[in-house]
Image (cartoon, helix red, strand yellow):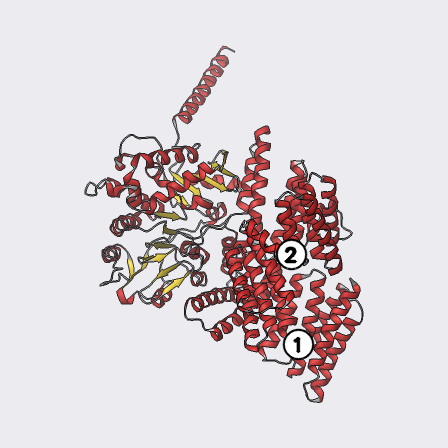
Amino acid sequence: MKSDFFYTVHFIFLVSLFMMSVLSTNTTAQDLSDSIYHDLDELVDEYPTLTSLNLYQLKIKERYSSLKSDQERLALVIMHCNLGFCLKEYGKHYDAVDQYRKAWGLYSNHDLTDYDIIEYCLKPLGNLLTITGNFSDAENIITHYMQMAQSQGNHIAYTAGVINLSVVYHNIGNYSAALELLESHLRKVDINGNQKSLIENNITTNLLALKKHKEAEIKIQNYEARSLSGLKNKAQILIKRKQYNAARKALVEIELLLAEKKSPRQLAKFYVEKSQFHFLMEEEDSAIVHLERARNILLPTVGMKEIFMKKSLLYAENTLIDIFDAYADYTDDSDLKLDYYELSFYVEKLIFKNINDAESKLIFQTSNRSRSEKCIQILYEQHQYSKNDSLIWRALHYAEKSKARVLKVSAHQKSLLEQYPTDSLLQRHQDLIEDQQSLVGKLIRNQLAEPDENSRSRLSQQFIELSSQISQTQNSIDKNYPHNALEEEVNFKLLQKQLRTESAQILYTFFGDKNLYLFWITHDEIKWQKHSIKKSFKEELVKFILLFESSTLINNDIPNFVNISFSLSKLFGRDLKQEYKNLIIIPDGLLSFLPFESLIKEKVNHSNYSKMPFWLTKWTIAYNTSLNFYQLNQKELVLKTLYGVFPIYSNSNRFLKSSKREAEMISDVFEGKIDLNEKATKSNFLRNSKQFDVLHLSTHASGGDFSVPAYIEFIDDVLLLPEIYAQNFEANLVVLSACETGVGKVVKGATPISLARGFQFAGVSNILLTQWKVNDNATSKLMTDFYRDLKESKSPAKSIKEARISYLMDKSISNIEKSPYYWAAFNYYGKVGEKEPVLINRNHILIIGITVFMILLGLYSFRHFYKRS
């Protein structure tokens, strides 16, 4: 390793020095650039240690902070690139990223030339960002240097960008996009042998991910699979075909190639993969041996006992997570399994906090989610044996660990800013995040409009610079405020106290890959149930949700609706109690689209909707994204002033007929400002949104798809989801009276990536949203009754309930239009609002009566005995 490492660094240095020789500068500049090159020469003359690398980084800060000429700057760019390479070889990926970012910042900000910045800086930077899970940053870096390469006529660098971009798409699960990118490039360009082999390998990898095994087999037969990725694909296919001896030989070839390559991280990763093969073959001793090898590469001289005692020895590295997860899978000791999983959670948290953008964090959290499900399953099995309720609370902790993590981080940052409003670092960080999300919106608009490569290149460069600044400010914030939002656990005692105060109970759901876990929590007990996610259950759930796609589907077969609704009610309502007035629901996964208010508590044999025992009539329901958000949402709801946006779209086929009546009604009930028609612009909304307690948007909207994000419409423009992320709203309530404002793609452990989630990210704690395309007339009536009640009750949860019941009981509305399709679209996320003592049921009264009787009997007996004595 030493020899290859030394010559690689020395080669980079010599190439850099040769390129530098073409520049001419004054004597003073030459002295300083010579000093930098002298340091670089020392760096590559002997194998650098981590200590010496740290000293060089410190020297850069102290001696080279004030550069005056381009030659000095270029010398420092080369120094940063070489430090980045050395740190990468040591597995110090985040430090390496920092060095490459500094190099690129200097190079681009000063328009430097005469250095192959793509090869020695941008390519390794893009790869490192992919490895560390910063997928948005990686995509922007790669597309940026692809544009640079194209303008320079550098076909090799452009093809390298295509290959690396396909890896990003693969890692975020967009296998089809990766496949299309690779195949399209292969058809258009004449590519050299090595790069063509890499593209063929990546095509096979994505075919396997899409479970197109036959196509992958054909593809791998058409080229020589001697490369590392090619052999890995070959081994995977052989294992799939149960040709284990051939697969074993392929694994030996891979190990030999890795030994030549001398990449410790890749070798450790391979040993984990090989241990999985041995485990599959029931060769458990060999599986453990290979795990030990992987761990010793990444954590030399550190034993497992020491790691358990001191987690701070661990660092942000994905392969460490794979190792600890594998240890957990290989042991039969359930407590030891949980200990190993805790190590994985710890490393995962270190990685998560180093990811800059929200979308990449959402993608990264899925592995955490799967691990949580395994932990919950272990505790469920233990509870079946011991009946110890503390195990349920512990399982709930694991479920909560994977909920709404990105929203929690955003809320934590905003909370810090509220606590320390004069801290310029916190304000700077918040401004940078808002600027970053705004840029994402601009990049999306650039893609959707006529392609403008110059504009996209400029925006990508701005995004890269912002990401670097966000990373730097986040590191400083972590030092100043070491408390991490992800470490903040729910206080279960305070939670139950809050439930008593609010006369509430909780239905908490965890929708895993294999099982659905349901938790029922009251002020004095907790119960749970595991329900297997069989194909039949999933089909029934999806079938019920799809009934709300059209106004006719429920009415066409009311008995079918009643049957499914009652079946789901029996499952989710098994341990719900009637005596509590309020019900808090924490939905998960597909359940985020389930209108729980429309579930029927008792089976009926009629079709009269107004007489059906819907959950709506039993409880006041409020949804929340997590227990953490429910517990922290204690701020009193001040709902005095309102700002409303009503584009209406008169004289068009998009006319919102009832929207004008809705606006007139709201203006009669609430003080504030209403913008109609041509005044309902995007700029007016953004300008007025921070001045009012309630924001009401009555317009068209879309839940988006995989190519276009969710958006909400104004008379002149749309507001994209990333642009909502970029805002900092202060309203106490947002009402999204538009279609599909709660709909979006689902990422495990997150609420749907919808407009509603965007407003939550931007600081709004209480939101009334829609789950499907709402009926205009029904919405107008519901909103009229909602606001009339809200004026008095100050409780959005109670007001939307009363508005729905009023709609159901209105004799002027036909039974067909009382279908849940018309009134169940609105879901309220936020504070339940009402605080009342817990209602006492008959059993409680009986117990109290007996207790009082026994006390009186005791007093009587005591007095009787006292008199006699």
Q: Regarding mark 1 in the picture, which secondary structure is present there?
A: loop
- 584 vs 684, left or right, is right
Closer to us: 247 or 99: 247
Q: Which residue is mark 1?
A: 65
Q: Is residue 858 left or right of residue 580?
A: right
Give x and y (percent) for residue 142: 57, 67
Farthest residue to the left: give it: 812
Q: Amino acid at mark 1?
A: Ser
Residue under the point 64% across and 69% down: 100
Q: Is residue 284 above or below residue 205?
A: above
User: What is the distance, in whole Å, between disc 2 and disc 1 at their CAs?
Assistant: 45 Å
Inspect the image, locate mark 2, and give the three-letter code of the amino acid beneath it. Gly
Task: In the rendered view, tell whether residue 197 sits above or below residue 244.
Answer: below
Q: On residue 552, which mark appears?
A: none
Which of the image's four quarters has the N terminus?
bottom right
Percent position of residue 551, x then y: 29, 46
- Mark 1 surroundings within 10 Å by alpha-carbon count, few (fewer than 14), some (14 through 19), many (20 or more): few
Tell me if residue 613 can be seen.
Answer: no
Q: Is residue 575 visible?
A: yes
- The residue at the far top in this view is 868
**Residue 230 got which mark?**
2
Q: Position of residue 865 (x, y in %)?
A: 50, 13
Tell me residue 490's x, y (percent).
53, 45
